[in-house]
């Protein structure tokens, strides 16, 4: 049996630790969303560069990249036998406790040799 002075201590400790655990969980979910968005940027740049290297019009290559990563800004340049595509975007922090954090800027670049006609 516990002494009378320790009654409710476990409940109080749990009540104090719950906000910390929730904040940690939200932070980890945000990091996963940043990682997922970066993978989408890489895929968008790769897809756009591949399309431009095949000889597709630049506007169509950009459209393919933007379809791969919705909300991303994709640019494509073709010259000197190379197709270069870049994809950029931002991921905002979750609301609540992390609302003060800035947006994370993501960037990906893909370069591929243009196919000869």
Image (cartoon, rainbow, N blue to C red):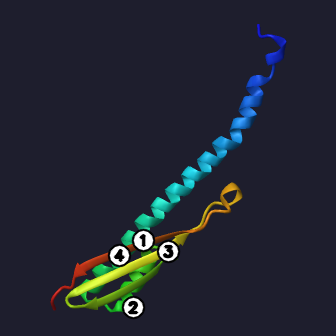
Q: Are marks 4 and 1 in contact (CB under 8 Å)?
A: no
Q: Does residue 70 appear left or right of residue 116 in this picture? A: right
Which quadrant, please, contains the N terminus?
top right
- What's the mark number on residue 89? 3
In front: label 2 or label 4: 4
Give the numbered dot on residue 41. Answer: 1
Q: Earlier in the sequence, mark 1 or mark 3?
A: 1
Query: Do the residues bearing badges 1 and 3 touch, measured as CB atoms within 8 Å?
Result: yes
Sooner in the amino-acid sequence: mark 4 or mark 3: 3
Quadrant in which residue 14 is drawn: top right
Query: Residue 108: where, in percent of width, then height?
Result: 39, 73
Graded by Cα atoms within 10 Å as few (under 14), some (14 to 19) or many (20 or more), the crowding at tag 2 reads few
Q: Nearer the viewer, residue 48 or 109?
A: 109
Outermost residue, left direction? Answer: 116
Q: Quadrant of the C terminus?
A: bottom left
Q: Is disc 3 placed on a helix, strand or loop?
A: strand
- The residue carrying pointer 4 sits among few (fewer than 14), some (14 to 19) or many (20 or more) residues within 10 Å by Cα, namely some
Q: SS at mark 2?
A: helix
- Is tag 4's residue or tag 1's residue first in the polypeptide sequence? 1
4 or 1: mark nearer the eye = 4
Q: Secondary structure at mark 4?
A: strand
Evaluate if marks 3 and 2 touch, with contact meaning CB atoms under 8 Å apart.
no
């Amino acid at each position: 049996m516990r002494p009378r002075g320790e009654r409710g201590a476990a409940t109080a400790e749990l009540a104090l630790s719950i906000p910390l655990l929730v904040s940690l969980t939200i932070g980890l979910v945000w990091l996963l969303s940043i990682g997922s968005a970066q993978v989408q940027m890489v895929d968008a740049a790769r897809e756009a560069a591949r399309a431009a290297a095949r000889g597709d019009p630049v506007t169509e290559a950009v459209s393919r990249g933007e379809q791969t990563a919705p909300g991303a800004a994709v640019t494509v340049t073709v010259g000197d036998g190379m197709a270069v595509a870049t994809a950029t975007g931002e991921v905002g922090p979750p609301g609540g406790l992390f609302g003060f954090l800035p947006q994370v800027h993501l960037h990906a670049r893909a370069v591929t040799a243009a196919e000869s006609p």
